[in-house]
Image (tube, rainbow, N blue to C red):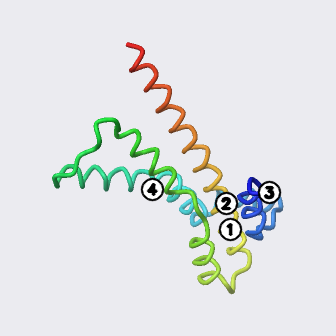
Amino acid sequence: YKRQAPLFAFTAVGVTLDSNQASNLMSQSFSLGIILGFVIGQPLGVTLFAFLVAKFTNARLNRNLSWWDVFAVGTLASIGFTVPLLVSQIALATDVTSLNLSKLAIVTSNVLAIFLAISAILLRSHFLKLRTAR
């Protein structure tokens, strides 16, 4: 039962899918902004902020970690949709079409972020194995 909880969360979002909305997803600037903000902006923001903290303070990465690990954590940080859905619900309450499109963009960005996080962790594991094999 517990393994079904994330799938239930995605279905409880209330996104209505039709071919028109799916085609509008990549053509509307605000839906592209949502997707790019989550999938690219969040991981880069987390990684850049951690780098700046390490650069301008006495903070240092643990010797067992690399900046790739920080990036992987940044990709994990971009997974989540409760607050964006709440903000969309408040901001777009009178525009049902835009609200549904923003919900679809949020769910799409979360799915992409999940795959990006999995890829980053798998790549990190692969490179770690290569490094220890030398």
Write down the residue under mark 1. Answer: 103
**Disc 2, SS:** helix
Determine contact: label 2, label 1, CB under 8 Å. yes
Q: Are marks 4 and 3 in contact (CB under 8 Å)?
A: no
Q: Is residue 29 left or right of residue 53?
A: right
Q: Which residue is mark 3?
A: 1
SS at circle 4:
helix
Rendering coords of residue 19 (x, y %)? 82, 58
Mark 4 to mark 3: distance in Å?
33 Å
Q: Are marks 1 and 4 in contact (CB under 8 Å)?
A: no
**Disc 4 marks which residue?**
41
Q: Quote the CA–CA distance across marks 1 and 4.
A: 18 Å
The residue carrying pointer 2 sits among few (fewer than 14), some (14 to 19) or many (20 or more) residues within 10 Å by Cα, namely many
* Image quadrant in which the C terminus is located: top left
Instruction: Report the Cα–Cα distance between label 4 and label 2.
Output: 16 Å
Question: Sequence-wise, which precedes: disc 4 or disc 3?
Answer: 3
Kind of residue indicated by mark 3: Tyr
Pointers 3 and 2 in contact (CB under 8 A)?
no
Quarter of image, res 109: bottom right
Residue 57 x, y percent position in the rendering: 17, 55
Give the number of the mark in front: 4 or 3.
3
